[in-house]
Amino acid sequence: MSENKIKKGHLCDAINQSEEPNIEVLYDLSELFKVFGDSTRIRILTALTAGEMCVLHLAEHLEMGQSAVSHQLRILRSAGLVRPRRSGKTVFYSLDDAHVKEILESGLEHILHKR
Amino acid sequence: MSENKIKKGHLCDAINQSEEPNIEVLYDLSELFKVFGDSTRIRILTALTAGEMCVLHLAEHLEMGQSAVSHQLRILRSAGLVRPRRSGKTVFYSLDDAHVKEILESGLEHILHKR
DNA sequence: TCTATACATGAACATATATTCATATGTTGA
DNA sequence: TCAACATATGAATATATGTTCATGTATAGA
């Protein structure tokens, strides 16, 4: 189809769209955003931008049960967004890398721009 | 709680975390990411980074039914991520603003970094 | 006006997901 | 070893969400 011609940009290149879109990467990308797509997890990540926090403090801060928070932390861990550090009985969680803040900020810019 | 002291960063400032976290903004943020959190919608957005496209071409490109694509386009429209342009019987969709690419790219960086 | 085409939308169904409850695991101190 | 505490996890339930099917709306051309 000639009307599918690509204006090349570096996003297109990165996902290799000029040939076949790299379906696998796009799937992973949607899985990543799915993790950000829950208010509890967003609140956890946001809280952790201020520094590490243990599970009970997170639960208090979010006014939620410890179990619910633990379940969400597991999802965040699996996605490589947070990292646990054990100290005795308590486990402190922190953001895994700088990308997390960047992703939050890029979304935030969009939100604030649309008001 | 004194252990909740904030190391100020501009994300924290933006969401006003040093006082009460702005729950409403965080909720909107999660709603935004939820829209990105589906592989069909990601594929639509990615296709549109190359330029505007009509519904049927999108459906062909994704190898999906027209109805499914239309439903997803509605969600993308509501979120302010894509914009329709009618031309006769066909409707062309394009990315609504530059933020969309930025969000996709920030997520992509994380994905590619973790391989 | 009638038909064909492009797109939108409501209802239904199947699947995914978040929270709760109960319980398990792991660590500390007596 | 036992009790207390912090966290993790499995099962169950309620809710949300994506796709399909059928149908509605809008535009163009005969």
Image: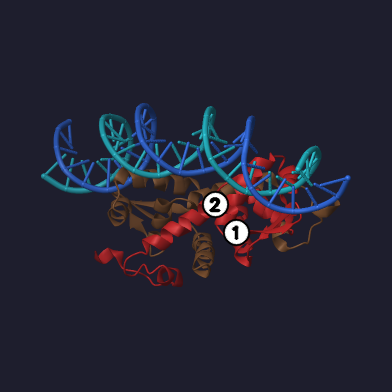
Chain colours: A red, B brown, C blue, D cyan
For image coordinates 43% across by 55% down, the residue present is B42
Instruction: Output the chain of dot 1.
Output: A
Asked whether residue B100 appears in the rendered view, the answer is yes
| Mark 1: secondary structure | loop
**Mark 1 residue crowding within 10 angstroms, few (<14) / some (14–19) / many (20+):** many
**Mark 2 residue crowding within 10 angstroms, few (<14) / some (14–19) / many (20+):** many
User: Percent position (x, y) of residue B112?
Assistant: 49, 68
Q: What residue sits right under mark 1 in the picture?
A: A81
> Which one is nearer the viewer's eye here, B114 or A23?
B114
Residue D19 lies in quadrant:
top left
CB of mark 1 within 8 Å of CB of mark 2?
yes
Q: Which mark is residue A38?
A: none
Q: Amino acid at mark 2?
A: Val
Left or right of residue C27: residue B41 = left
Q: Is residue A15 above or below residue B67?
A: below
For image coordinates 86% across by 52% down, the residue present is B2
Residue A19 lies in quadrant:
bottom left
Left or right of residue B109: residue B90 = left
For image coordinates 39% across by 72% down, the residue present is A8
